[in-house]
Amino acid sequence: MQENFSFFNPVRISFGKGILKNVGKIARKYSNNALIVTGKSSMQRSGVLQKLLDILKAEGVGSTVYSGITPNPTCIEIDEAAKMAKDFKTGLIIGLGGGSPLDSAKAVAVAAKGDIPVWDYLKVKAKEALPVITIVSTSGTGSEVNRYSVMTNPATKEKPGFGYECMYPKEAIIDPEIMISMPKYVTASTGFDIFVHVLEAFTGKMKNAFSSAYCMQAFYLLKDNLINAYNEPQNLDARGNMALASALAGLAIDLSGTGIIHALEHPVSGNYPNIAHGAGLAALTVASLRYNISGCKRDFMLIAHHLGIKRAGKTDDEYAYSLIEKTQEILKAIDLNMSLKDLGVEKEALGKIAKEAFATMGFAVQNNPEEIDEKEALKLLELSY
Amino acid sequence: MQENFSFFNPVRISFGKGILKNVGKIARKYSNNALIVTGKSSMQRSGVLQKLLDILKAEGVGSTVYSGITPNPTCIEIDEAAKMAKDFKTGLIIGLGGGSPLDSAKAVAVAAKGDIPVWDYLKVKAKEALPVITIVSTSGTGSEVNRYSVMTNPATKEKPGFGYECMYPKEAIIDPEIMISMPKYVTASTGFDIFVHVLEAFTGKMKNAFSSAYCMQAFYLLKDNLINAYNEPQNLDARGNMALASALAGLAIDLSGTGIIHALEHPVSGNYPNIAHGAGLAALTVASLRYNISGCKRDFMLIAHHLGIKRAGKTDDEYAYSLIEKTQEILKAIDLNMSLKDLGVEKEALGKIAKEAFATMGFAVQNNPEEIDEKEALKLLELSY
């Protein structure tokens, strides 16, 4: 019998080539004074930030820009941006960019409504937030459609995730044209993030019929488009399909969570902020799949099928195992076949990483299909080294 | 390249065996005074209505019952119920039963907020409605999770559908235990309604990656469970899977609409209120699939695959066509292999039915994968006779 579950996602998703032009009218529904939360350079360089400012201006929406978000955003940056939102009395937060600015925009929306530092919301439940519009420039985090925000505490290097119902974006604008300018390495690492989202949501303990629907469709879209988008950055069709896969995967993890791969990766890039989240995931995935396979055979077989692997006389075990080989193939094709050592993680940091995974990512650890303790997690890290 | 689309569904869906017991607490979030909109007998006979009244009372939520909804609800019934909601100053509408009470609950919620007859909302856009909770007792219409309402005008026999954003239920309670008491004929006809929802949403012009995800999962769930639920009414697992398929299909048509089968069926049961919607659909489906097959080969092949039909050396054409054979098999297995004539439709009514389909269901006609005019629609009706 199916487990009880609840399904809720109130985000209005608009998808289409060139739809950025509609964002002025959409913003106006919420406020005529917006704070744009973005990173330091890519949206400036690609011209998308200027385009957004022009579109808002033309629609009579005033805006202020906070462009201090770093790749692994800190609670200090978020508090700074929230102060700006208060100072400028903005009624709307627009997140522009990849996962970091979008995650931050949601956290800023909460902090701007309250009077405590954002880090305190790990313990204090947030009940209200400013409305948020996400304009996503990468395909991977799923942050554009879910309530989650991940932030790093620079003092302790902890990198927990949090998410309350008031943090769902009101609107997600998904325009594949914005993604054309994504560098190859970002296409690979964010694209692999999608892969791990659907892997973990499809096999996790909290899986249900709705999240599985999203995952199956996302695997189907990932099949050709991940490698095509990597090899042909201008391929709008591949970009669009990856953007859809990202949103589907974002909805899936919103419903059904992640697992041990995400639990271990957060402290990796928390301690090594220069490691991209997707690269950290890439280093951890194969060992984690091997750890989980015994309890996930049927799920792995279904995923193998959706990834287009031919059954061709394979036994159930062989077919389930073929997912691991396929994952290695994909990692090679997008130049992410790297170990934690290759990424610059120090051997002596592994113990701390394992400990932090259990301290700050307990919900993901618990959702992993196989039980795992800190000692086994350390072993996984060593196998991924 | 993918078409532009927008995705939005703010309904909170709660699924699980026995979760009806939570409805008191859920209702209280919205109001302490509810109008229950239901039919004349089945919820009384099964004891579910009394159970609901007790649960609401225990939680301090007052309630009034309107139990005048007929199988093809009329605008007169809806206006009566809306008057009750106004007279009793209720702040919440609870729809209890199958598609008819749930559709009606949404229309009542609109009419209770306004001061014009509900029929006028076919032309006047509704901007606000009372909050609605749906408690679904059948698996088929998808009304529990979408914004649509279908009503019949007894004067003209028209049976149009309408749906505005304010009509989305706030909450959908899906408890498979309530479905155990569903009669076999209702299991068959509502179950086949799911089948046609996903058929039309998966092949329609407005299809997108999200609705296709719902459809694929629904086909996967329908594969064994439609016939199992029909043959084993007490099988809670089959009931639960059919309930999930119904919700997924409801979300799919909310995003991507239906097609010619629904367009033609509405005037059938509008003119012959004793014909169950699913039975009308059953009579129309095979001819419609034949009409659509040439432009839908790849979609039909994918559906065939999800319904578990083996490819086994079939050509593409043969594999696509196998969906039509499978549909006939399913109709036989659930005793719905009937023509319009078998259902009591008069031959001379076919012209009027074709005309009304174009007059009141134009959006479904336009969404059909193949272009179709009134003459061709009449031909389809004749082939289904």
Image: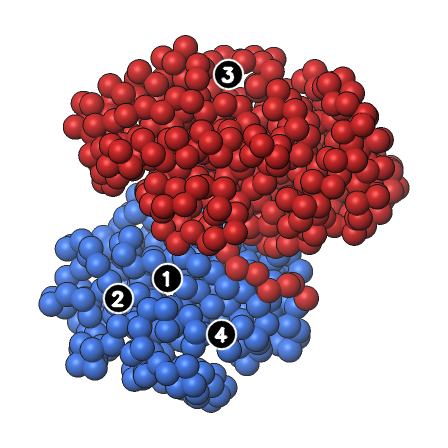
Chain colours: A blue, B red
| x 55%, y 81%: residue | A181
Q: Which mark is residue A170?
A: 1
Of all chains, the one bearing label 2 is A
In the image, residue A61 above or below residue B108: below
User: Dot 2: few (<14), some (14–19), or many (≥20) neighbours within 10 Å?
Assistant: many
Q: Which mark is residue B182?
A: 3
Q: Which residue is mark 4?
A: A22
Question: How many numbered tags mark residues here?
Answer: 4
**Label 2 – label 1 distance at C-alpha:** 10 Å
Which one is earlier in the sequence, the residue at label 4 or at label 1? 4
**Label 3 – label 4 distance at C-alpha:** 47 Å
User: Dot 1: few (<14), some (14–19), or many (≥20) neighbours within 10 Å?
Assistant: some
Kindly identify the amino acid type of the residue bearing the numbered disc 4: Asn
Describe the element under mark 1 as helix, strand or loop: loop
The part of the image, by quadrant, that contains residue B167 is top left
Q: Say whether mark 3 and mark 1 are on the same chain.
A: no
Q: Which residue is mark 2?
A: A130
Which one is earlier in the sequence, the residue at label 2 or at label 1? 2
* Residue A68 position within the rendered picture, expressed as x and y whole percent measured from the top left: 30, 82
**Label 3 – label 2 distance at C-alpha:** 45 Å
Left or right position of B208 against A361: right
Describe the element under mark 4 as helix, strand or loop: helix
